[in-house]
Image (cartoon, rainbow, N blue to C red):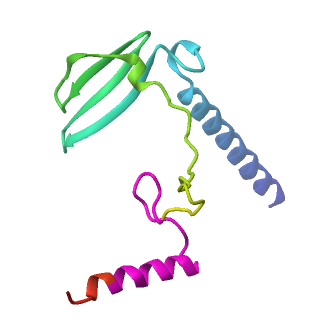
Amino acid sequence: MVELVLRIGFSLLIVFALMWGLARLVRRPLGGRRGAGALAVLSRQQLTRGSAVAIVQVHDRALILGITDQQVSLLGEADLGAFEPRPPHRDRLLVEPDGDLPAVHPDGRPAGSLVSPRTWESTLDFLRDRTTRR
């Protein structure tokens, strides 16, 4: 009985090892190259369920491609510099000349947290202004 369990366990171990090896072989890119290649998708915008526009970098060129279920068409070329990654900007508030922080970020988002007294004061001031009869 113990011999049967060992045989089944050993056989199962061999099957799992073969599956793992095949999975690694399938994931390996063709040609054996690793790392970034000469082709990269810089941007993609879905237009409809079956069509999209993509910006693809091929060496030192940026190509605009129209993609459908049936074909891929070259629409034109773009400036590659426009699609290079930009350094991340810091999410800082602009300080007003009197040293007071504004109620909004430079991009228009509200500043402060919900538990901040300043947030509640500015909300109440806004509501008072909107509900005052003139």
Position of residue 4 measured from the top left corner of the image (x, y, whole percent): 76, 55
Image height check: is 72 above or below 110?
Answer: above
Q: Magenta stretch: residue 18 in it? A: no
Residue shown at 39%/23% (left/top)?
A: 82
Image height check: is 71 above or below 46?
Answer: above
Residue shown at 68%/48% (left/top)?
A: 12
Let me know if residue 49 appears in the view. yes
Let me know if residue 115 appears in the view. no
Residue 55 lies in quadrant: top left
Q: Quadrant of the N terminus?
A: bottom right
Q: Is residue 131 left or right of residue 113?
A: left
Q: In the rendered picture of this protein, how many numbered marks are placed on residues? A: 0
Position of residue 107 measured from the top left corner of the image (x, y, whole percent): 42, 52
Residue 101 lies in quadrant: bottom right
Outermost residue on the right side: it is 2
- Viewer-side residue, 39 vs 16: 39
- Viewer-side residue, 101 vs 109: 101
Image height check: is 21 above or below 63?
Answer: below
Residue 34 lies in quadrant: top right
Q: Which residues are magenta?
A: 103-128
Q: Quadrant of the C terminus?
A: bottom left
Q: Magenta stretch: residue 112 in it? A: yes
